[in-house]
Amino acid sequence: MIVRTLDEITDTDADIKTDNWRSKRIILAKEGVGFSLHETTLYAGTESEFWYANHIEAVFITQGEGTITDKGTGETHELKPGTVYLLNDHDKHIVRPRTEIKCVCVFNPPVTGREVHDENGVYPLITED
């Protein structure tokens, strides 16, 4: 059994900070459970473009409001607490928080914590030995 708190992760190497967002990686590939789990904060007034070409991501919004735009279709959806979006087709997307958004994210395959978004917003596929 693994029991972990966000306070234990804060300001460690599992707490990734950028100008637009912060991701606390709670469960990673090293745990060997087939997914990774993150709490992500998206900062109000920012715009982040992502494309998880190597991962499927599910996102559950717990706080805040904004929009997500599917770059493939141009369709925009409202984000608010209780909303879930699933990037089941490796969808290129843009997230625009109007207020600070907190969300819980699940990745499959799991991330290791060493990934960095490339110029296209893609995480490379890194596996644990």
Image (cartoon, rainbow, N blue to C red):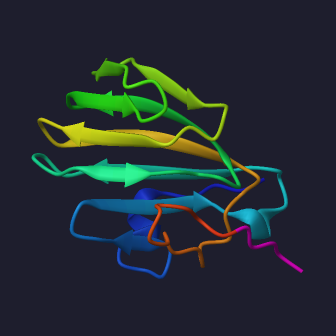
- Report whether residue 81 is seen: no
Please identify the quadrant where the C terminus is shown: bottom right
- Report whether residue 28 is seen: yes
Which of the two residues, 13 or 71, is positioned nearer the viewer here? Answer: 71
Seen in the picture, residue 40 relative to 67 is either above or below; the reply is below
* Residue 62 placement (x, y as % from top left): 34, 30
Q: Is residue 129 left or right of residue 65?
A: right
* Residue 22 placement (x, y as % from top left): 33, 62
Residue at image coords 60%, 79%: 114
Q: Is residue 102 left or right of residue 84?
A: left
* Residue 75 placement (x, y as % from top left): 37, 20
* Residue 122 placement (x, y as % from top left): 55, 62
- The image quarter containing residue 101 is top left
The residue furthest right is: 129
Residue at image coords 74%, 49%: 35
What span is colored magenta in the figure? 125-129
Seen in the picture, residue 54 relative to 114 is either above or below; the reply is above
- The answer to whether residue 25 is magenta is no
Residue at image coords 66%, 70%: 124
Which of the two residues, 81 or 94, is positioned nearer the viewer here? Answer: 94
Seen in the picture, residue 44 relative to 31 is either above or below; the reply is above
Residue at image coords 58%, 74%: 115
Which of the two residues, 38 or 56, is positioned nearer the viewer here? Answer: 56
